[in-house]
Amino acid sequence: MRDVQKDGALTSVGALLRRPAVIVRHEVMVSLRDAGFDDVLPAHLGVFQHPGPDGQRPGVLAQRTQASKQAMNHLLHQLETGGYIVRESHPDDRRTRVVRLTERGWQAADVIDQTMERLEKEWLSVLGEETYAGLARALEKLADHFDQKLGAGS
């Protein structure tokens, strides 16, 4: 895909974001498999996405991934069965459950973090510090916008 269309207009940002997202997912899955985490599925990556699931309520994780609570609970059940997480009562409200990473879950999260560090070093090398920093700031601004929309119930 080219950055500029035939009429000179830039390619849509959404289209340009798709390819890095696909590459990230692929590289993370390969790294997890290579590290022995064969039972982690692509659908589970949403649970592990930044800032991670530890201490979060299942409903918050569902919102972050744009999944239904039922779908998120299904993913959490799979991860619990695999020994990556446990669900326990919230320390301040026993009626509420929170997700906690187990030692195995932290190990998988470390593999994901190392993979992202490797990819980001590569991207920094390709883009240069100024462009990379500008891209990071722009994406943080978008993330804040998405968080505000979630908070508003949109």
Image (spheres, rainbow, N blue to C red):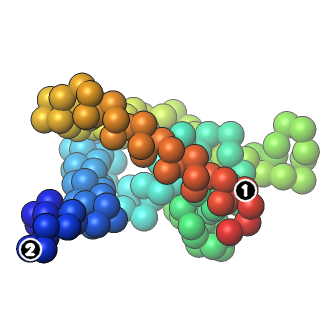
Residue 4, percent across and down? 13, 63
Nearest-to-viewer mark from 1 and 2: 2
Sequence order check: which comes first, mark 1 or mark 2?
A: 2
Q: Is residue 31 visible?
A: yes
Q: Residues within 10 Å of mark 1 (few under 14, many from 20)?
A: few
Asked whether, in this view, residue 124 is left or right of residue 65, the answer is left
Total marks placed: 2
Q: Which residue is mark 2?
A: 6
Going 57% across and 56% down the picture, which residue do you hit?
Answer: 146
Q: Is residue 86 above or below residue 75?
A: above
The answer to whether residue 114 shows anywhere in this view is no
| Identity of the residue drawn at 90% across and 38% down | 92
Which residue is depicted at the point 42% across and 37% down?
A: 137
Marks 1 and 2 sit apart, C-alpha to C-alpha, by 40 Å
Q: Amino acid at mark 1?
A: Gly
- Where is residue 8, by image quadrant? bottom left
Q: In the rendering, which numbered label is found on residue 151? A: 1
**118 versus 37 height, above or below:** above
What x and y, as percent, mark residue 52?
54, 42
Q: Quadrant of residue 31?
A: top left
Q: Secondary structure at mark 1?
A: helix
> Which corner quadrant holds the C terminus?
bottom right
Question: Residue 130 versus residue 43: which sits nearer the camera?
Answer: 130
Task: List x then y, in percent, for residue 69.
Answer: 67, 69
Looking at the image, the residue that sits furthest to the top is: 129
Check the picture and name the quadrant holding the N terminus: bottom left
Query: Is residue 131 toward the left or the right of residue 70 in the image?
Result: left
Q: Identify whether 39 is placed above or below 51.
A: below
Task: Name the amino acid type tagged 2.
Answer: Lys
